[in-house]
Image: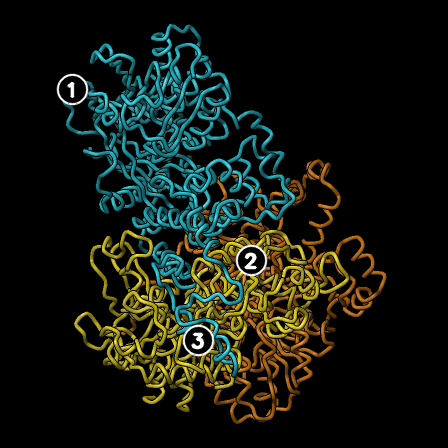
Chain colours: A cyan, B yellow, C orange
Amino acid sequence: MSSRTGTDTDVVVIGGGSTGCGIARDLAMRGVDVTLVEKGNLTHGTTGRMHGLLHSGGRYAVSDQQSARECIEETRILEDIASHCVEKTGGLFVQLDEDDDAYYEEKLQGCRDCDIPAEELTAEQAHEIEPYLTSDVKRAIKVPDGAIDPFRLCVANAADAERHGGRVETHAPVTDLLVEEIRAEYVVNATGAWAGRVGEMAGLDIEVRPSKGVMTVMNVRQVDTVVNRCKPKGDADIIVPHETTCILGTTDVEVDDPDEYPEEQWEVDLMIDELSALVPILEDARTIRSYWGVRPLYEPPDTGTTDPTDITRQFFLLDHAERDDVGGMTSIVGGKFTTYRLMAERITDHVCEQLGIDRECTTADEPLPGSEDAGVLDDYMDAYGLRSPIAKRSTKRLGSKADEVLETDDPNPVLCTCEAVTRAELRDAIDHSGTDLNAARIRTRASMGNCQGGFCCHRMAYELSPEYDERAVRESLDELYQERWKGQRHALWGEQLSQAMLNHALHATTMNRDRDPANDEEPGIEYGAFDAGPGPDAEADRSATAAADGRVRSDGGVSDDEKDSSENGGTGKQEESTRGDQ
Amino acid sequence: MAISDDVLVIGGGLAGMTSALAAAEEGVRVRLLSYKKSTLRNASGLIDLLGYADGGIVADPFEAIPALHEGHPYERVGVERVREGLDLFDESVGASYLGGHTDRNALVPTYGGTVKPTARYPVSTAAGLASDARPVLLLGFEALSAFDAPLAAEHLRAAGVPFDVRGVSIEFPKRFRADATAMRFARALDRDEPADDADIGTRAALVEEIKDHLDGAERVGVPALLGDEDPEEVRGTLESGLGVDVFEVPMGPPSLPGLRLEDRLYDALDDAGVRVRTGNPVVEFDPDDGYITTVYTDRNGQHVPFEAEEIVLATGGLVGKGVKSDRQAVYEPVFDCHVPHPEDRYEWFRDGAFDDHPFARFGVSVDRDLRPLDADGGVEYENLRAAGSVLGGYDLAAEKSGSGVSIATGYAAGRAAGECA
Amino acid sequence: MRVTPRGFDTEFDPAQVFDDPTEMDLRPGADNCYKCSTCDTSCPVAEVDDDFPGPKFQGPEQWRLKKGDDRDIDPSITDCSNCMRCDNVCPSSVPLSQMHNTARGEYVEGQAPSLWSAEDALADGEFREALSYLRGVPSELSIEFVRNRVLSNYGTMAGLGSEVPRLTNLVMGSRVTKWVNDRFFGITAERDFPEFATQTFREWWRERGGPKVESADKRVAYFHGDYSNYNTPEVAKAMVRVYEFFGYEVRVPTQRCSGTPMFANGMLRDARRAAAVNISNLSDFVDRGYDVIASCTSCSMALGQEYPELFDIEGTQEVSTHTYEALEYLRIHEDLEDELRDADVEFPDLAYHAPCHARNQGLDRQAVELFGELDSLEVEDVGDSCSGISGTYGWKTEKYDTSMQIGEEMFEHMHDATGETGLTECPTCAMQMGHGTGYEIRHPLEVVEAALVDQ
């Protein structure tokens, strides 16, 4: 209970995406008693479903220079405070022979206007950086784009909020703003594309215009630099190297409902067809899945933009007291991932003003947890008895926690060989996320490689035992396997279709998970009707004890009591699977 | 001048090897061309015939086969050929497999903790059958993350097995690096390498470790790692040391039982005088008036010709790459035989991971002589037959029918090719 | 009409994009991997040495985990013996050995940049600069590097040795030399150095006056390799006699080592130099209508597969598509089977071992299949295990035990076989077979020669 106001907490922040986590951190650091609530996992919404680009601002340097300036400033800050989440890949704006010269010049000038370092490259220099670029390259502009892991960033923000006294409640859907289960003095609606939904509960009309975009995940990194096509903004014009993969993006189509919209084949095909003009090997390269995200676009009433591509990427702070005469609540809409911290700063300033608190924002200066002493990472390479690429990946993911997690005397096998995730790292994730293996997945990247979990989902699930019972393990496995299947459906041809068939054969044929008798309704299998072995006596002896209904346990088998307890004692099925599935 | 034989089998998996053996029985000269190692090394080594039909479990596959839909590979060849194919299999693998004494399926515990119906099983798995009421101890190894013995035991209990089952995880008596391959375990047991902490061999040390956990169990199940060269001796040593039966739980890839089966069948091919050539893919062929006269293998652009009277296509399915696909279509890469499939790529799958997926049934369709049919239902080539998972019209995973179809159609195609040659 | 269906012609060729193999980005090659582990089941090293994680990790997994500028290849790459069996088994055609070769090359470059720079400086005559590179290099590293370079440049050493073969044999066989090699260079004292022939093949060829048969349409250029030249000229002579028996004009182009030992040691710079000479000389012959014939299956492997996978030298693909193993070429172009069927040959019974590199080219059963037709001779295949020596691998002190453990199975099967003479196409497999059993080891061409030519 908040000592200051007599409510449960001073401020409730709704939404565990980048903005919500950023706000929670900022408020907590300024000494405000804050509780963040999220209906799923952290990054459940848009944050978990973006391409992971850390914008230099180059993309907006022509169309939206204010956003561009904010981007370059925030990128510099994040490289500093969140180094374990960021990969400084650099970015290229590539002009092909057929592309407009005038636009290239505008882009270059725009970058310079916005203080975005921009270096001009000849075609040859561009090929030196990215050998797989098409031979049709005319020239390119190099900018400081980067790649960022949104999940690690959100977790770091949430952890820091908690360290400063805040609370983070995941799997806590907001059902009604009037039911005072958590009573707060002030509410921040940071639910992005879902802001309209939350607004409705308070009788508010918030005109977010959710717009979907596809992200197609390649199996390997064909490029190590963010590659943008240097032409006016359009569909399928960017390739972002992300961890072991490249992500192709994207489309921009307005949707009615951020939870229910069609995921369409033309979108995936468009990514491959368009972007292989830039990097030709993409044409025959393997994609492992596709996913869609929903942008939280907003424009003030009566702007009337028809094409979602033209809607501004700036953010808006809607104080519902001023706007709608509903006190105690502000919504933040629009904006983009790269500037999440700045958005948080602005809204925190606003909330503090409302609460009469006068504290400076320090989120741009204080490093996020995990990112301290990042320089030490290199020293870990030879430790832990891991092969060097595995140690390197793990330590990068774990940041300054690496020592604590990876130092173990027990056997530490690699569970996910595609992404180099060891047992120790997965168990650490499970300590935080329980039976929700999808949450463990986005913490570790386990099951996110080329086999899409075919060879590791079960290994991951087995790590839940003995802490959780068999039924809970089985359900978690089914849930993870299904979630992995969902994204793969959009990549089912060529190698990934062969992979899908191999996974299917492994899980259905060898393990018989599709017809698992443990999932059967009564009466189950008649064990006595099957072969008990060829021995002369075996037939008579053994099948006699296995009576026709297959339920006899004459030799002290499991009692009914034990069985019941295992059925009822399982951990309940978690919320719908998490959606962060890059 | 081409390298010449009577029957040419393309594909070295279960179907191809069975075809070659069946053709050789007809007294003709047979050559088997195999590009890579077959998917047997991924498979459990169990010989599934038909485990499920119409969504229900099948106790007697021979009763269920005649009721299968038109176009199913078993319907194409008929139940008699299925029996004859299995006879040839039994003869070829000798005492290393069991199950031929009855028409009924056996239920074998899987490493996922379920049981599954199968028709023939390696002798090393025999003591583990789920219709046997003797109490079981399952044993796992700490570093081997794919098999969690206590959990598998709990799962088997949930599956209602009619016996007492417990599971325990121990350390393998010789500690390897945590990512050592299954082959390393098998080798240590094959050679009975010295254990880490004692002056005894790995086998004896394992016996000592297991003994403490027996506690009334009459049979002990371990992951299928008990030797590659001499699995019977390894298992025998453990059994006599423990005084109880020991069985293997078939694992995922890499599969030792699959490898051993491959070795057995290769020996059978040698005994039958089949000539084998591995390592290079068939990439071209000469068609002549509805017949295929010569096929060419490729090695770095260099083509080697092989000619034969009759040809069997046994190149596998999507996993074995006998069926391939791109964003537009599904195709058979060697002879470009017609593969029926929906035009819309989003009709190739269903939304649930274990739903009834059309892709699982992709493959060539054939007449009752197993000759691939073109889009109009005509025979593609008079002297070409297809066998195994290159065939469409069945879902080996859902039905648990993969090995059975390979054996039955391999046998039928090989025998017909041998008779015609 | 010949039909080429779709499906096998879309393989990705990174050599078009990168000119230096140590710069090559093979991550796209990982696309084919679906993790089935079949490669791991075929790896002879991983089976005995769990410090070696197996080809799947070394190939597609390690490559996929790389980021652009990563240079830290796991050191276990040097434990790979380059037997290339994984290539032959992968059901999904992952370019495993290419990945291993390239990673090993990168690793060696990364470990020894100063050594390479010193060598380049020396080549340019910049001695002072060369010395400056060598300061600060740990002596173990430079010794291992020098040892690996000596082993992988066998031809150079052999060329010197065979100038005075008897003296060299005496010196190399001496216990003192072996002790020094083992102690200071890490070359095992357990093995006997191969003896140098008193007359090399090329000397014999010159003395003989070159080819005895001339032909306008049946012409082959013989790539004999170092070993048949310096150590087993009888194999090379058999090749010449058998081909001339069939009416071929045989030419013997100037040549250097095929590069096999250099690949295995990550010495890609050396390999590239040797390959450039070979490709240039052989492509001259190919242009004039000759096919290239090798009697050593590792040589045919290098020319046929490794060159086009690793080098972008002009003429590589042309030489590759025209290179054949000696017996296979006769099977395609002559009715060798028929000729052998009626032959009467005096030759001891044989225990045949298929070299891994022969297996990789689909030739592992050829000898047994062919000689199975001979009534007067029994030949048995001793199984599909690896001999374990893999070129220079088994010569290294630290690898000797692993090498012998891998070979154990083959030795046992050789002892079980009826024949007490070994048969194989590969000279280093032959060393290992002889070392493990004490048998004399022959080459299939010698059997054909005995059957057809000597009568």
State how far apart marks 2 and 3 are (Cα): 24 Å
Please tell me which residue lies in front, C87 or A10: A10
Q: Amino acid at mark 1?
A: Thr
Position above or below: B335 against C109: below
Q: Residues within 10 Å of mark 1 (few under 14, many from 20)?
A: few
Please tell me which residue lies in front, A542 or A35: A542
State how far apart marks 1 and 3 are (Cα): 74 Å
Query: Tag on residue A531?
Result: 3
Indicate the position of residue A20 as horizontal and vertical percent values. Answer: 37, 23
Quarter occupied by the C terminus of chain A = top left
* Residue bearing mark 1: A303
Res. B370 in view: yes
Indicate the position of residue B353 as horizontal and vertical percent values. Answer: 33, 53
Q: Residues within 10 Å of mark 2 (few under 14, many from 20)?
A: many
Of labels 1 and 3, the one closer to you: 3
Q: Amino acid at mark 2?
A: Gly
| Circles 2 and 1 on the same chain | no
Please tell me which residue lies in front, A113 or C90: C90
Q: Quadrant of residue A15?
A: top left
The subunit carrying tag 2 is: B
State how far apart marks 2 and 1 are (Cα): 67 Å
Position above or below: C389 against A72: below
